[in-house]
Each structure stands twice: as C-alpha cells, then as structure tokens.
Amino acid sequence: MLTDEDIIQGCKKGDRRAQEALFQCYGKKMYGYCLRYSGNPADANDLLQDGFVKVFEFIGTFKGDSAIEAWMTRLFINLAISRFRKRGTGPQFVEVDSIPLAEQAEEKEDVQETLRQSVDEVLSALAALPEKYRLVINLYAIDNLSHREIAEQLGISEGGSKSLLSRGRARCLKKF
C-alpha cells in the first residue's frame, strides 16, 4: 500500500496511479466539503472535479509543512469562495448543537435513525439557503473562522459577516 508521501511524490511526477490513489483516499471527504459549500450535488461534483484538477496542477507547491489533507481542504474551500465571489452572492450558517434526538429511545438503532434524519434535515435546510448565507455559516460554524477572517476572505465587512450569519441562522431555523 502506498503511503501519503509515495502518493504525493507520484502526483508531483504526474503518475496517474498516484493521482487515482490520492482521489481514492480523499475524494469522499473533499466531496463533503464541496457539497457543504455548493448546496447541491451537481455543483458539488463540478467543484470536486475542478478542485482535484487544481490539486494535481499545484501539488508541486505542496511543501509538506502540513498534512496533505489540510492543504487540499484549504484549496477546496478557497475554490468555493472564489466561485462565490464570481457569482456575487454570499454564504450561510446552521448550528448543529441543537439537533433534536428522540427522548427515551428504547434501542440504539432508534437513536441513530433519529440522529441521521435530524442531520439530514439540517443539511437540507442549509442547502436550501441562498449561497451567501450558506458560505458564511460554513466558514464560521464548521471551519471556525472569525468574522474578521470571513470578511477578509469574502471581501465584506465584519458587520456584514455577522449579519449574514444571523440572517442565515434565522432562515434555517424557520425550516424547523
């Protein structure tokens, strides 16, 4: 089995097997980021493809200071933000802390099914938000960026970031 270092070196040399191995290792996780930022599977697939093209194009700049996964995650998030800027729309947010669970569930499967349904509802509500709210919510709640960092990334004011977060939360909570 290839190590991350073997895969990275192979990708730097343009080895298709190494590129496929990198995709197999990290494709699902990167797709999760893409789906979270895009809001629908079709756009997520486009973002995933474009993201891996960028990964393979710029893998030569990867210095190994951090894990390849962290480097790729940042690349995918930056690509999503870049698309947001080109569209001139914005981000969104959902708090996952208050996911309703079944009280007094008799079996573990009941709790797991309830949780799965609740998470699906939250993700659905998040995906239904306009892009500007979804992006701010993801950056703030999931990626733990400050309002100052979000403002810098998106080219908006800190107050604008706070406002988008608040409005996005309110819109999302209306779904429940």
Image (cartoon, helix red, strand yellow):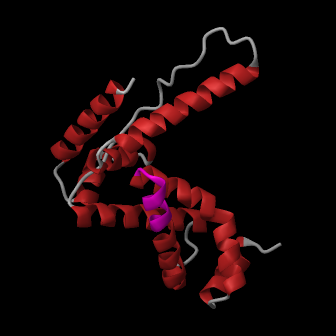
Residue 60 placement (x, y as % from top left): 53, 85
| Image point (29%, 60%), residue name | 84
- Magenta-drawn segment: 39-47
Task: Say whether residue 67 is visible.
Answer: no
| Image point (70%, 20%), residue name | 110
| Image point (63%, 83%), residue name | 11
- In magenta segment, residue 14: no
Q: Quadrant location of residue 111?
A: top right
Residue 150 placement (x, y as % from top left): 29, 52
Point out the image quarter for the N terminus. bottom right
| Residue sitting at the far top | 104
Determine whether, in the image, residue 33 is placed left or right of residue 37.
Answer: right
Residue 51 placement (x, y as % from top left): 48, 71
Q: Quadrant location of residue 83?
A: bottom left
- In magenta segment, residue 44: yes
Determine whether, in the image, residue 17 is placed left or right of residue 120.
Answer: right
Determine whether, in the image, residue 92 is placed left or right of residue 41.
Answer: left
Determine whether, in the image, residue 107 is placed left or right of residue 162.
Answer: right
**Above or below: residue 62 compared with residue 107:** below
